Each structure stands twice: as structure tokens, then as C-alpha cells.
Image: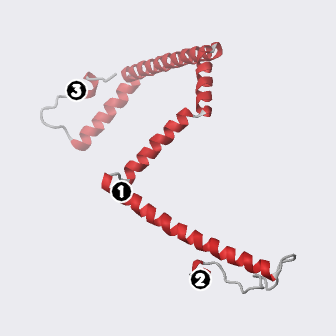
Amino acid sequence: MDSSEHGSPVISPGVAIGGTLPPGLTEEEAEEIQVELTKVDDEIQTLRQVLMAKERHAAELKRRLGISPLSEIKQNITKGWHDVQCSNAYLTASATLEDIGRSDAYKRTQETLSQAGQMTSAAFSTVGSAIRNRFGEMRNSPSFKTFEDKVENMKYKVMGRSNGESDHSPTSNNAPF
């Protein structure tokens, strides 16, 4: 098999790629190196062919066993996660986080943040109650009643009264607040 079929250049004996021999290299040494290079290139090509044949054979065996590419990926991820969990870096970080979780400073910070959250929740609840009460007061105020009556009158003038509707405004009896 000629080495030019494998992508490596064929060099005439006595001539390097640049046209001249490198310093300190005789024509005979260059020829020996060229022959060795050709042999190595041939071996590489043979190994590539063998590897491709082995990969095809492995794929066929996996297919016959029912191992799909997806299950293979899943298995690789599981193995990778297991390897991470067993690594020194993960174990060290995990131990450090456990130590931090047991520290007094962490516990105090956690308690403080918990109290702040409870206080914030209570404050929002109080503000919500105050707003609800204020809207209730506004709804029962004479100004709002006058505004509500005007809107109702406008509605009746535009749409008219439907059958069975009484003369008093429906909103005045069923206040949602």
C-alpha cells in the first residue's frame, strides 16, 4: 500500500519537504526515516480500520442486548454523578457545608432571617387589613354614595331597567367590603 493513499506525502529519497535535507541529516538517514514514517502511517491506518470494525461490532452487540443510545447516556450520567459524589472535592465541600450548618453564626443568621420574614409577613397583613378597612370606610362615605348613585343613574339611563329590578340601587345593599 502506498503511503500517499493515507494522506502522508511521498518524499523522494534524498529530498525533504522543503526541497533540501535538514542540517545534520544524510540522504541515507532521511531515506530510513521516510521508510519508518511510511510504516507508521500504514500502522495508523490499519489501527483505524480495526477500531472502526470493533466499534461496529460493539454497536451490534449493544443492539442485540437492547441497549439504546438513550439508556447508555442515562447510564453514563448516573455513573458520572456517582463519580462526582465520591470525589474528594465533593466530599470536602459537603463536609464544609455541614460544618457551616452546625455553626452558631449560621444558626443565629437563620433565626434572624426567620424572624425578619415573620415580621414582614405580619406587616403586610396589617397593611392589607388597613387598606381593606379604608376602602370599606370610603365605600360607606357620603361622597362615594353620591358617586355610586350617579353611576347607577347613568347606567339606567343608558341601558334602561331590566324586568323585576327594584327602584333602589343593587350596590347599596350588597357591599363587598
Q: Position of residue 12 (x, y in %)?
A: 72, 87
Say whether disc 2 or disc 3 marks the residue closer to the N-terminus.
Answer: 2
Helix, strand or loop status at disc 2: loop
Residue identifier under label 1 = 61
Q: Position of residue 62 (x, y in %)?
A: 36, 54
Q: Identify residue type, mark 2.
A: Asp
Q: Position of residue 100 (x, y in %)?
A: 62, 20
Q: Identify residue type, mark 3.
A: His
Q: Nearer the viewer, mark 2 or mark 3?
A: 2
Q: Identify residue type, mark 1.
A: Leu
Q: Position of residue 3 (x, y in %)?
A: 61, 80
Residue at 41% in and 21% down: 132
**Disc 2: CA contacts within 10 A as few (<14), some (14-19) or many (>=20):** few
Side of 117 where 89 appears, left or right: right
- Rendered image quadrant of residue 157: top left
Side of 146 where 8 appears, left or right: right
Q: Are marks 3 and 1 in contact (CB under 8 Å)?
A: no
Residue identifier under label 2 = 2
Q: Quadrant of the C terminus?
A: top left
Residue identifier under label 3 = 168
